Image (cartoon, rainbow, N blue to C red):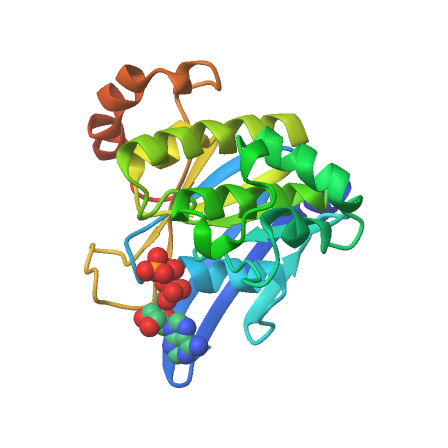
Amino acid sequence: MQDARAEISGGLSVRLLAKDFGRRRILKDVAFDLAAGEVAALLGPSGVGKSTLLALIAGLDDDFDGRIMRPPGRLAMVFQTPRLLPWRTLAENIALVPGAGGLSRARDLLAEVGLAEAADTHPERASLGMQRRAALARALAVRPSLMLMDEPLVSLDPAGAAAMRALVAQALARSGAAALIATHDRREALTLADRILEIGVPGGDPTGFPARLLADRVSPLDRAARTDPDAVEALHGAWFVAQPAAPE
Ligand SMILES: Nc1ncnc2c1ncn2[C@@H]1O[C@H](COP(=O)(O)OP(=O)(O)OP(=O)(O)O)[C@@H](O)[C@H]1O
């Protein structure tokens, strides 16, 4: 029934029963739907299986038990490492995306992420923050209906992370794409997402497997409230502790 609803709403439907690597079960019982345009955080500690789940959703790995229905339209993935071609400029990296609209649109997209001046720079001369922004522009170039982002703010300094957070929020709002953003950071989840999907190992053993969906909660902050760092700061400890730990 829920599968049918997701198909009708044009969203993402994940019904993962199990994902194994060799004899080790990494993920078990992860079920959720994401409506068109909805932005969710996939929150869990490092190494718990977030990247693995994103790869399954992206269709990069089809070795699992269960069923994943992707929304119609295109899918874009922003990897943890920016994965830009080193011998191409930032603009050329974006223009290479099929359907991106050539160098002129690539420059417009780079301007949207604050990189107008760096369009002709090669990735090795760009900082990690700039490369991340270029990777975001490249994802937007495909005009996706679903964006998958793996730790978009990790390893950035506080100012770079704040700038990137604002850019991701703006870009998602403007594009209207549904998004699933993997993060280990509660503040990041609260700042970016309408909904927070927590994955982890029941009982909290960070070294244990398999991880499951522990909680599926609507954020108490609307998109405007999220831009206020004080509101996020006030919530990030107490809200998570106070919420029930299991999905309904
Ligand atoms: N191709 C693979 N073969 C075997 N084990 C793997 C493979 N890819 C990932 N793993 C293991 O699966 C587990 C989950 O890894 P994954 O990268 O999905 O976690 P994560 O939550 O994304 O963490 P991080 O944010 O640190 O990348 C880890 O124990 C990892 O070692």
Q: 162 or 7, which lies in front?
A: 162
Q: Quick one: quadrant of the C terminus?
A: top left
Relative to 147, is 235 above or below? Answer: above
- Ligand 1 quadrant? bottom left
Q: Is residue 176 visible?
A: no
Q: Residue at x 60, y 52 (%)?
A: 89
Q: What residue do we see at 50% from left, 30% from top?
A: 167
Looking at this view, is 136 or 56 the one in front? 136
Rendering coords of residue 46 (x, y %): 29, 57
Residue 143 image offset from top left, x and y in percent: 72, 41
Q: How many marks?
A: 0
**Is 231 left, or right, of 150 in this rendering?**
left
The residue nearer to you, when weighing 167 against 59, is 167
Q: Nearer the viewer, residue 195 or 108?
A: 108
Please tell me in which quadrant of the rendered image residue 156 appears: top left
- In the rendering, at what x and y percent does residue 173 appear? 60, 26
Outermost residue, bottom direction? 23
Q: Which residue corresponds to the image point at 28% horizontal and 53% vertical from the top-left?
A: 45
Horizontal placement of 183 versus 116: left or right?
Answer: left
Decide if residue 14 is on the left or right side of residue 21: right
Asked if residue 102 shows in the view, the reply is: yes
Residue 185 sits above or below residue 203 on the image: above
**Residue 148: x, y in percent?**
55, 49
Residue at (67, 37) in percent of width and height: 107
| Above/below status of 220 relative to 211 | above
Determine whether 175 is above or below 18 in the image: above
